[in-house]
Amino acid sequence: MIDSLPALPTASPLRALLHEVFGYEAFRGPQAEIVEHVSGGGDALVLMPTGGGKSLCYQVPAIARQRAGQGVTLVISPLIALMHDQVGALDEVGVPAAFLNSTQDWEQTEAIERRLLAGQLTLLYAAPERVGTPRFLGLLDTLAAHGQLSLFAIDEAHCVSQWGHDFRPEYRQLTVLHERWPQVPRIALTATADATTRADIVERLQLESARTFISSFDRPNIRYTIVEKKEPTRQLLQFIERQHAGEAGIVYCQSRRRVDELAATLASHGLTALPYHAGLPAEVRRRHQDRFLREEGIVMVATIAFGMGIDKPDVRFVAHVDMPKNIEGYYQETGRAGRDGDASDAWMAYGLQDVVNQRRMIDESPAEEDFKQVMRGKLDALLALAEATDCRRARLLGYFGEHYRGAPESQLDASTPSPGRLKATSAGAGCGNCDNCLAPPEIWDATECARKLLSTVYRVQQQSGISFGAGHIMDILRGKRTEKVVQHGHDELSTFGLGAEFSEAQLRGVLRQLIAVGALQVDAEAYNTLKLLPSARPILRGEQALRLRAASAAAPPRERGRRARSATPPPAVAELDAAGQARFAALKAWRAEVAREHNLPAYVIFHDATLAAIAARAPAAPVELEGISGLGATKLERYGEEVLRVCASA
Ligand code: ADP
Ligand code: ZN
């Protein structure tokens, strides 16, 4: 990850606080500047990738300001289902926090309100819809009147924008916070926002005078792979079994029905796979989410209804068996892999049908035309990423306005096939950790093929006065005398059989890309038939060359298998000697018990990395636990003795 700038001298009391409460040595990247700015009462807009450490950006100022007598921080979060764990994590480090949401009864609510008014809370989490209620506004008024309303933190701030991928209308009413209590500083945070969304967040939340902090959006530990969709279920199974057996992952599908089917199929192949979508009863969803967070090696098969705010650190892969709507969605969803910084995969299978479906969804939506136009532009950018023959990471970051200059030499590890070749194909900007960098795809000149396809579409339309679908066009070109071809006399067209040398996969690939570049349109209102668009003209005339990825790339490059045989332990664990491994195992078993007792996910108690560091030290006395990352004062006090006991008896 982006590693620590030297901490600012003025930030040192905050750094001391970070060390004392969270047990961390230093701030990461822009955290130091952000916490200093916000602790001092400044407004901030923070754009930081998942796993970058956004929570600390408001938690540290919240603690500092509470200690300075400025009262409570209100955290707006759309994630009711996760508030319990978020508050639990703060409780574990000794920071008094609570949440108010619709899952609580009257008595619980009143008890929290009393603690709030008595100044006993450092952070209060609430859903955006709560903020609009008169009762809640009254509470905030009381706090503000006593100078006890310290800070507003607006998490998942992209939810305020309809251009984002998670629009929540309730977020719009958050302007009330600023209008009613202009003196209270605000920090808005998000892990994803392209330029359009970013501008929209600023406008909607009236953050014009806030300082913006933008981190690099690169996630170097995530390996991006996009394969051509053939038999997605089989491809997915192979991907999981070969590279992630026994590991936790998320598989995204477009429809609920597909989620149910795929979860059942994976389960029948021996995987612990659970479905998650908005059509399941709330109780089932909660149970599945809990199991995903609390057990190891669960594969969650889900629609995009799942995942926002999931802070499980060891999700080893995110797979898409259907294409998402846009790059922001793709980035956000794949970003849920590898928060802990260890090697992880983002894998997607993508095909012609995805392009057709996504275009149709936009065309058929009841939205205004200018909205659809933006959506089409966003889809096109994703299609270009999927079709790219160069570095995926460079493309992805480019979309977010970041110029990727290539991985530092040290990052191009030994598994990279011949670095010389890599440099040659990707002009020095290769990341060494995406499919295209690891195994540069073969390119073929598809210009002729594209011309033949386009002119077939044109001739068919001319001759019959109506349009036809992709299958029929390919049949004509490949010279197949199907019933339909003969019936319409299309075997007499001059292009009939002209494309016999192309495989169906090749033709599909070209069609997909012609749709992607806007030369062809799929008419959803007329049985998905193909229509020519103006940008087909230069291709038809032979003025525009089309260089495409050769349709193959089914087998993953050999290096991959070696990198990730099933369940590779993270480096810190792999380095332990036998006795250390035994201590680590004992600590994990102990942690599981504590987590169960506290009804929290294990990683909230201690991360694997913290347990590995303890195991490596073989501590025999309390002082030997000091300075271990993730072991703050409260945890040291609460668990120090037990940790020593577990280590001694392992
Ligand atoms: P985000 O919300 O940006 O996705 P989190 O706030 O969940 O990220 O942080 C990701 C992980 O990194 C967490 O496990 C967190 O404890 C850890 N982390 C964040 N900042 C630091 C830091 N300065 N030092 C060590 N670990 C950190
Ligand atoms: Zn790359």
Image (cartoon, rainbow, N blue to C red):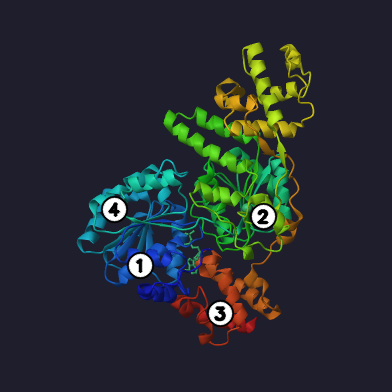
Q: Find disc 2 in the rendering and name its residue.
A: 423
Report the number of discs.
4
Marks 2/1: CA–CA distance: 41 Å
Q: Is residue 87 visible?
A: no
Q: Which is nearer the eye, 642 or 345? A: 345
Q: Which residue is mark 4?
A: 136
> Local crowd at mark 4 within 10 Å, few (<14), some, or many (≥20)?
some
**Farthest residue in the front direction?**
543
- Disc 1 crowd rating (10 Å Cα; few below 14, some 14-19, many 20+) is many
- In space, the residues marked 4 and 3 are separated at their CA atoms by 42 Å
| Residue type at tag 1 | Glu
Lower sequence index among marks 4 and 1: 1
Disc nearest the viewer among 4 and 1: 1
Q: Residue 298: x and y, percent?
A: 63, 56
Where does the image place residue 432, in percent across and percent down from the top left? 65, 57
Kindly state the secondary structure of the residue where label 2 is placed: helix
Can you give x and y, in whole percent of width and height, for residue 82 in the image?
47, 56
Mark 3 and mark 2 in contact? Answer it, CB < 8 Å: no
- Residue placed under numbered mark 1 in the picture: 36
Residue 320 seen in the current view:
yes
Quarter residue 340 falls in:
bottom right
Nearest the eye: 88 or 545: 545
Mark whose residue sits in front, 2 or 1: 2
Residue type at numbered disc 4: Phe
Q: Quadrant of residue 491?
A: top right
Q: Nearer the viewer, residue 619 or 446?
A: 446
Name the outermost residue toward the left: 145
Secondary element at image label 1: helix
Residue type pointed to by label 3: Val
Residue drawn 70% across and 33% down? 446
Contact check, label 4 and label 3, Cβ < 8 Å: no
Q: Disc 3 designates what residue?
A: 643
